[in-house]
Amino acid sequence: MAELSLGLGRVLIFRKDADAAIERFEKVLERHPAGDHAAEATYWLGVAEYKASHDPERLRARWARLAREFPASSWARRTELDGSPRRRTPGN
């Protein structure tokens, strides 16, 4: 069920309904507060909050939380604390 909610949230972002996406990702976090689903929801929640507010600080804050709470997740590795994509090196 979490996968469907995450997918719907991403569709809502791309359909420019960031507020509905935020609600969707928050529900995923309420129901699945730990693990991969929570890490992914936190990542996309930051994106949705940015899309809704156009405030990069909201994205940075959410992704900083992602790095703190889920440091070993693949979703945390997609970000840096400054909100910009990580530069990947071969083998990473």
Image: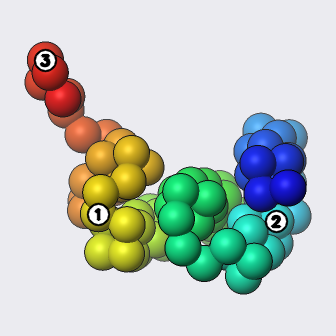
Q: According to the image, label 3 marks what residue?
A: 90
Locate residue 92 relative to residue 21 in the image: left or right.
left
Q: Quadrant of the N terminus?
A: bottom right
* Residue 42 rendering spot, x and y as whole percentages: 55, 65
Give the distance between the C-alpha atoms of the residues marked 1 and 2, in whole angstroms. 23 Å
- What residue appears at the point 24 percent right and 40 percent down from the top-left corner? 86
Kind of element beneath mark 3: loop
Which dot, 3 or 2, sits closer to the camera?
3
For the residues bearing labels 1 and 2, Cβ distance under 8 angstroms: no
Locate residue 8 relative to residue 76 in the image: left or right.
right
Kind of element beneath mark 2: helix
Q: Nearer the viewer, residue 20 or 32?
A: 32
* Residue 40 rendering spot, x and y as whole percentages: 56, 55
Question: Mark 1 belongs to which amino acid?
Answer: Pro
Q: Which sits earlier in the primary sequence, circle 1 or circle 2?
A: 2
Q: Is residue 37 above or below residue 58?
A: above
Give the distance between the C-alpha atoms of the residues marked 3 and 2, in whole angstroms. 35 Å
Question: Mark 3 belongs to which amino acid?
Answer: Pro
Kind of element beneath mark 1: loop
Q: According to the image, label 2 marks what residue?
A: 24
Q: According to the image, label 1 marks what residue?
A: 71
The disc at residue 55 is none
Question: Mark 2 belongs to which amino acid?
Answer: Arg
